[in-house]
Amino acid sequence: MNKAERTRQFIIEKAAPVFNTKGYSGTSLSDMTDATGLTKGSIYGNFADKDEVALACFDYSYKKVQEAIKKAMDQYPSYRDKLLVYVEVYTNRGNHDLPTGGCPVLNTIVDADDTHPGLRAKAGAALIQWKERMVVLIDQGKAAGEFRSAVNSEQVALTIIAMLEGMIVIGRGTGKPAYARSVIDSIEQLIRGL
Amino acid sequence: MNKAERTRQFIIEKAAPVFNTKGYSGTSLSDMTDATGLTKGSIYGNFADKDEVALACFDYSYKKVQEAIKKAMDQYPSYRDKLLVYVEVYTNRGNHDLPTGGCPVLNTIVDADDTHPGLRAKAGAALIQWKERMVVLIDQGKAAGEFRSAVNSEQVALTIIAMLEGMIVIGRGTGKPAYARSVIDSIEQLIRGL
């Protein structure tokens, strides 16, 4: 990386937790200068505008979650155990390196709903990609005889994602980890029953 | 209602769809003056600050959802059918009068996460109240012999709420109604299997 690329990467690393915590519209230029210790001129010397910083920050946070999940899944040979990694990562059990502010896909979809359509499209594409990867995993588990062949892979994948996202909303909203835990129990039961 | 109360109510009715669509931090004073056609002075003559407008708007949108659900449930004598009203209302089937912008509890919890703790607390309390009402409904269904007595009412209530919230996130994020429909199918299967 040359100096410009390093500065760009530095800005992304420092700004990503802010965007992922405060949301797109909640993150101001002064939040970005505070987080990076750089001037406005330096930030906009490396990015065209706030939209471009937000898009790069989303990619960074999303990649961080993906890497944590892949690393954890690689430890398990069984497809059921691989699927259960989502439960492990989203309850932050184990020692995963996860982005500050929680799930970037959930945060971005809800926050960027009407204010930044480009960011919303990116988060939507990430969600579809996530679902597709889970479908492949469930199909492999069916082919390996681990899951029943009657299982509707796409419905199960979408239902697990919905429960994970809803679990985060409930845990965050009520401040009651026991509630989130209860939803996680349902996800575990669903995966164990496949 | 006296004139001041009518003005206050008018501001709430006009500003609530904006807060429920753009979020707390995304809603500016000029959004409020645009939506109401009133001046800044008139708005802040009736409310102490933006926080107070946001709290009143949340109450308004939340009450609107509650009334739509209660009205629909009153049509059905069976507890299973009453529970299925959540599926009906959240897919906007039937002719319900629902707030612009979608589920105020989901919107508010995610948006007000760090920026307006008072609003977040209100949305969290609404979510807990929602869960409690659903637990009562499931318990009544168990007492009436409609649901199995082994059903864990609280876990089921939290799981249904998580799936509904997650279904909204998925539908909104991907723009694919078929995905949301697939999660809804899982909620229906869950309720029919109780």
Image (cartoon, coloured by chain):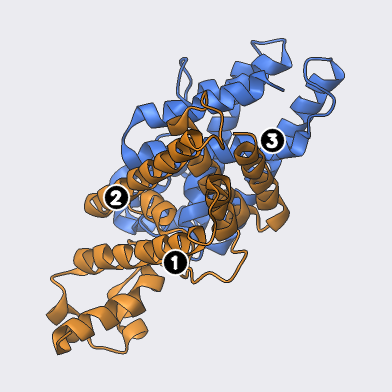
Chain colours: A orange, B blue
**x and y, in percent, of residue B131 in the image:** 69, 39
Q: Do labels 1 and 3 share a chain?
A: no
Q: Which residue is drawn at 46% across and 15% down?
A: B95
Q: Earlier in the sequence, mark 1 or mark 2?
A: 1
Question: Which is more toward the observer, A109 or B148?
Answer: B148
User: From the image, which quarter does the N terminus of chain B lie in?
Assistant: top right
Residue B12 visible, this angle: yes
**x and y, in percent, of residue B17 in the image:** 40, 40
**x and y, in percent, of residue A163 in the image:** 55, 42
Q: Which amino acid does label 2 sit on?
A: Arg
Q: Name the residue under label 3.
A: B157
Q: In this view, does B58 lie to the left or right of A176?
A: left
Q: Give me the disc on residue A21.
A: 1
Image height of A36 relative to A28, above or below: below
Q: Mark 1 lies on which chain?
A: A
Q: Which amino acid does label 1 sit on?
A: Thr
Question: Dot 3, crowdedness within 10 Å: few (<14), some or many (≥20)?
Answer: many
Image height of B102 relative to B41, above or below: above
Q: Which residue is drawn at 55% across and 55% down?
A: A85
Q: Which chain carries label 2?
A: A
Residue A65, quarter of the rendered image: bottom left
Question: Dot 2, crowdedness within 10 Å: few (<14), some or many (≥20)?
Answer: many
Residue B61 visible, this angle: no
Q: Do labels 1 and 2 share a chain?
A: yes
